[in-house]
């Protein structure tokens, strides 16, 4: 089984669109785990109820956080509930236009060593992954995938980066330190819209800069 984990906060239309695409394009051996991160919009519960009652090929499981856990915390909670041998962490602002799951299965099968798959792997200076002239490559967090065994070995997302930003850089750095290869899926079936929940504004920039300092403190010995 493949577990696709999707957290959301309000903006139900985004998650609804992803479920429509999953129903249309993804194979039967996929379960979907939705994590409601303390949404305030009243249509979220009703929307999930519609999908759980609909005739769909995929089992849809629903988790509601009692407190806002942010991106990493919600993904971690979803991973604990997941029953799949392969875990796929998907943002709800990623448009699906084909069966990208088969691409993930193929990458895992063809690599002899452990891998962490990202929507893309960024090997250049993105503005937040360069420290002391050293660039830390990372899998972009809007899509991440790996086996359950690899996920347990990596230890999941670090909660210190809540509510969001730097979880993907941190997880990728952990993967490299544990001799786990970063692999970009670069799927033609996925398109990341970006910023649909958190947006790009001064408040988010402050969170990003704060988490950049946390990343430096955590990985100081590697950086220096």
Image (spheres, helix red, strand yellow):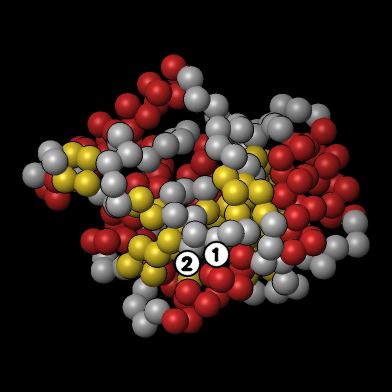
In which quadrant of the rendered view does residue 2 lie?
A: bottom right
Residue drawn at the location 40% of the way across and 23% of the way down? 205
Q: Which residue is mark 2?
A: 146
From the viewer's perspective, is residue 74 above or below residue 30?
above
Q: Can residue 69 be seen?
A: no
Residue drawn at the location 16% of the way across and 45% of the way down? 134
Q: Can residue 185 be seen?
A: yes
Residue drawn at the location 61% of the way across and 73% of the way down? 102
* Mark 1: few/some/many CA within 10 Å (<14, 14-19, 20+): many
Q: Mark 1 and mark 2 in contact (Cβ < 8 Å)? A: yes
Position of the N terminus by quadrant: bottom right
Camera-nearest residue between 178 and 63 = 178
Query: Does dot 1 land on a helix, a strand or a loop?
Result: strand
From the viewer's perspective, is residue 132 above or below residue 170?
above
State left or right for residue 187 relative to residue 35: left
For residue 50, the mark is none
Camera-nearest residue between 217 and 66 = 217
Q: Which residue is mark 1?
A: 87
State left or right for residue 65 relative to residue 159: right
Direction top: furthest residue: 202
């Amino acid at each position: 089984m493949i577990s696709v984990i999707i957290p959301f906060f309000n903006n139900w239309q985004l998650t609804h669109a992803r479920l429509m695409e999953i129903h249309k394009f993804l194979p039967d051996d996929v379960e979907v785990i939705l994590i409601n991160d303390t949404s305030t919009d009243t249509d979220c519960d009703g929307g999930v109820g519609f999908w759980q009652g609909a005739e769909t090929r995929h089992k849809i499981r629903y988790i509601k956080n009692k407190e806002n856990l942010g991106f990493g915390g919600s993904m971690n909670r979803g991973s604990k509930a997941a029953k799949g041998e392969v875990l796929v962490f998907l943002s709800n602002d990623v448009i699906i236009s084909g069966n990208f799951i088969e691409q993930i299965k193929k990458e895992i099968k063809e690599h002899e060593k452990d891998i962490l798959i990202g929507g893309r792997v960024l090997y250049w200076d993105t503005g937040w992954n360069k420290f002391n002239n050293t660039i830390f490559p990372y899998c972009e967090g809007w899509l991440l995938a790996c086996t359950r065994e690899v996920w347990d070995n990596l230890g999941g997302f670090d909660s210190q980066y809540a509510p969001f930003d730097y979880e993907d850089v941190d997880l990728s750095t952990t993967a490299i330190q544990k001799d786990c290869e970063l692999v970009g899926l670069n799927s033609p079936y996925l398109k990341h819209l970006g910023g649909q929940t958190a947006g790009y504004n001064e408040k988010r920039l402050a969170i990003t800069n704060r988490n950049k300092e946390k990343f430096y403190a955590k990985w100081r010995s590697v950086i220096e």
